[in-house]
Amino acid sequence: MRTSRRRHTLCFQMAAPAGPDVRPLSTADTGRPQDTRPLRVVVAGGGTGGHLFPGIAVAEEIRGRDPRNPVLFISRGNEFERSALARAGFPLEPIAVEGLKGRGRWNQVRALGRLPRAVAQSVCRLREFRPDLVIGLGSYSAGPVVLAAWLLRIPIALCEQNTLPGITNRALARLADRIFIAFERTGGGFDPGKTRWTGNPLRREIVHAASGGSTGVATVPSDPHRPFTVLVLGGSQGAHRLNTAVVEALDHLEDRERFFFIHQTGPADEAMAAAAYARSGTTARVRAFFTDMAVQYLGADLVVCRAGATTVAEITALGKAAVFIPFPFAADDHQRLNARRLVDAGAAEMIDEQELTGARLGARIGFYASHPEALAGLAGQAARLGKPDAARHIVDECCRLVAERASRKPAGGPTGG
């Protein structure tokens, strides 16, 4: 694999901040035409929306700067990954890899036994694609790819979405050149010299909605004839307990005709939830999964949801009032920690699942429907915590990293074996 110092001129132009001491390069600076060959990036991992969507956000930013920049995803290749990446227009190369945490001793031994094959597959994928950079998303399927990149001496960046880093990023941190964190006080003991607090990258549709000024504060209902709209999100895979709690809450709402629910159920509970809304006489839009999340968010006054990192980032970027119900079995209880950061800032409310009942949830929904000032207070505080430009900052820093690595090598020198 070969590169040159000039290869990443375009990328570095976009990354360099203009100012009295630093200015973008131009033809006048070099005395010769600029090299505009594309930047090649591999995004490693995915599995669920919480890992995959930030990777898609970064990939969209890379492609948006120059459509010729090729981005390849390497992961396990489950149905959700294939569907989401096909919609986003990015190719996926699968590798045979299994997770370790919470799978029982025998399954862990089997997964470890298959790890060398996954690394070998990743080495082959990287040699074929010849990337300038590998970005790991923190899921277990990122591990073999990042390790292969390290063996091939390809620059590595990691994205950590949660307050408490997962086992994969904790294990890979020493190999990384940059680590991008979503929360200012992220644990894990990452090297501060490598770590950048950027926020969690968001898909372009969400960033566009956030930049358009349509926030939760603006959607607080002032028209008494306008229904109070509740968006219910259980994550990309759905959440059965959350779904049943919302259905139970319908019986505890007064004047149900005042409400409109937008409910992402996951595939298992779609029919059950749709039937429950119909029986109660409550107007609702029920889908297993929404592909136009920005539209759904912008129509909502209150969000009732899990506290995955991507959901938290979207809510803060859009300035939405939220009631979080963290998934209690998330690794290292990271969803509760994510939600706690917003609750402590006065930007959200949280109900632990063991305390969740239909009556309690119905009471909180009814409270915010009747107290627009409290709703606006949560939305306003959430907006102050938002970082909608995370993807841009991450790509800027990745461009600097690639340019710095290239500048330390002789022109035409090898980068990846």
Image (cartoon, rainbow, N blue to C red):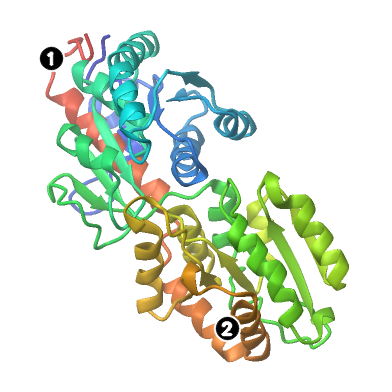
Q: Work out whether 84 lies above or below 200.
A: above
Disc 2 secondary structure class: helix
Please tell me in which quadrant of the rendered image residue 157 appears: top left
Q: Amino acid at mark 2?
A: Leu
**Residue 258, relative to residue 270: is it above or below?**
below
How many neighbours does mark 2 have within 10 angstroms: few (below 14), some (14-19), or many (20 or more)?
many
Q: Are marks 2 and 1 in contact (CB under 8 Å)?
A: no
Q: Is residue 120 left or right of residue 96?
A: left
Q: Can the viewer see residue 158? A: yes
Can residue 10 be seen in this snapshot? no
- Would you identify the image quadrant in which residue 43 lies? top left
Mark 2 or mark 1, whichever is nearer to me: 2
Q: Is residue 205 left or right of residue 61?
A: right
- Residue lying at 36% horizontally and 12% vertically, measured from the top left: 121
Viewer-proximal residue among 250 and 371: 250
Determine the image quadrant of residue 83.
Answer: top right
- Residue hosting label 1: 410
Q: Secondary structure at mark 1?
A: loop
Q: Position of residue 353 (x, y in %)?
A: 49, 67
Q: Could you tell me which residue is drawn at 55 percent across and 88 percent down?
A: 374
Q: CA distance from mark 2 to mark 1?
A: 58 Å
Say which quadrant the C terminus sits in: top left
Which residue corresponds to the image point at 64% horizontal and 63% vertical from the top-left? 232
Q: Position of residue 210 (x, y in %)?
A: 55, 61
> Relative to the observer, which residue lies in front, 236 or 374?
236
Residue 128, x across and y down, in percent: 38, 8
Label placed on residue 375: 2
Q: Quadrant of the N terminus?
A: top left
Which amino acid type is shown beneath numbered disc 1?
Pro
**Which residue is pictured at 31% across the width and 11% down the height?**
120
